């Protein structure tokens, strides 16, 4: 079964497949990723991200260093919801959105955003769509190209239809647009992670670990493409 990695951008710099397709759709295997080193910090700092800082302070620092340290994306762990009302002001702050039933399904929906619009729509089984749910009116479905600001009202309309409404039982926004303002809910996450590009072949996977909204440790692992 084809795997979809459209939202795993943060880890994708060293784990996702670099795919090249020819006319007969043969997919080239990705390069091997070798682990070079790993470390755990429980005091001090990395990139100016300091143990003991709050989530608010760390996010502001990440925004300042993201270009210099070539940070490719920020993933917020356990950023899930049960009500679409919780997403009304949050969706524009992220670059992706997951919807599924309480028990995960192969037809869960994954949206990616770019330039404040819906860039792609995938199902968990790898099927790409241009609109979801299929067969519903424009106001009760989400299409590629829709402004992100319109998504919340469309979700409200989708919820009125029993079949697609099942996919709104579990909602997740993991992939933070670090050019957008801080989301206060980020303070409740136990972990953020990102990848910093060190060279053309070498990447540093960084995990920021929190307790009570403060940074308590930093895990780093350096990988190199072979």
Image (spheres, rainbow, N blue to C red):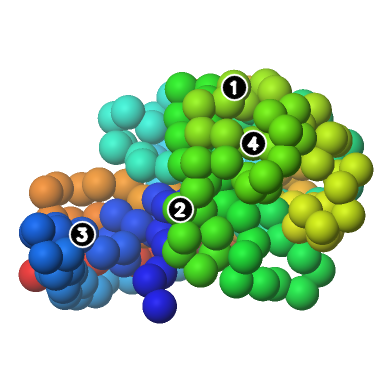
Residue 154 coordinates in the image, percent (x, y): 76, 32
Q: Nearer the viewer, residue 167 or 57?
A: 167
Q: Nearer the viewer, mark 4 or mark 1?
A: 4
Q: Residue at x 9, y 58 (%)?
A: 23
Residues packed near mark 2 inside 10 Å, few (<14), some (14 to 19) or many (20 plus): some
The quarter of the picture where residue 21 lies is bottom left
In primary-sequence order, the first of circles 4 and 1 is 4
When asked about the image quadrant of residue 25, the answer is bottom left
Q: Badge 2 is on which residue?
A: 128
Front residue of this view, candidates 201 and 84: 84
The residue that disc 3 covers is 18
Tell me if mark 1 has few (under 14), some (14-19) or many (20+) residues whose alpha carbon lies within 10 angstroms of its own. some
Q: Tag 4, which secondary structure? A: strand
Percent across and percent down for residue 69 are 30, 37
Say whether residue 194 is visible: yes
Report helix, strand or loop for mark 3.
loop
Residue 63 has which mark? none
Q: Which residue position holds label 1?
A: 147
Position above or below: 226 against 141: below
Whether pointer 2 and pointer 4 mark residues with C-beta atoms closer than 8 Å, the reply is: no
User: Residue at (90%, 43%) from the top-left corner?
Assistant: 160
For the residues marked 2 and 4, what is the alpha-carbon distance in whole angstroms? 13 Å
- Residue 59 against residue 215 in the figure, above or below: above
Marks 2, 1: nearer the viewer: 2
Residue carrying label 4: 142
Secondary structure under the numbered disc 1 in the rendered image: loop
Q: Are marks 2 and 3 in contact (CB under 8 Å)?
A: no
């Amino acid at each position: 079964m084809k795997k979809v990695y459209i939202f795993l951008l943060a880890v994708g710099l060293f784990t996702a497949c670099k795919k090249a397709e020819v006319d007969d759709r043969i997919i080239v295997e990705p390069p091997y990723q070798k682990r070079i080193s790993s470390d755990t910090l429980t005091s001090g700092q990395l990139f100016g991200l300091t143990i003991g800082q709050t989530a608010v302070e760390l996010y502001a620092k990440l925004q300042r260093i993201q270009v210099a340290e070539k940070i490719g994306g920020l993933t917020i762990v356990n950023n899930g919801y049960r009500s679409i009302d919780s997403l009304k002001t949050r969706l524009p702050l992220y670059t992706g959105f997951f919807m599924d039933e309480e028990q995960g399904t192969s037809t869960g929906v994954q949206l990616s955003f770019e330039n404040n619009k819906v860039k792609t729509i995938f199902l968990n089984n790898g099927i790409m769509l241009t609109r979801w749910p299929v067969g519903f009116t424009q106001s009760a479905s989400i299409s590629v190209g829709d402004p992100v600001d319109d998504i919340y009202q469309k979700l409200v309309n989708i919820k009125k239809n029993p079949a697609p409404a099942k996919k709104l039982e579990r909602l997740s926004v993991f992939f933070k647009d670090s050019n957008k303002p801080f989301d206060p809910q980020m303070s409740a996450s136990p972990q953020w992670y990102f990848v910093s590009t060190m060279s053309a072949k070498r990447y540093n996977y960084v995990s920021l670990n929190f307790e009570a909204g403060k940074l308590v440790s930093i895990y780093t692992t350096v990988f190199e493409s072979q």
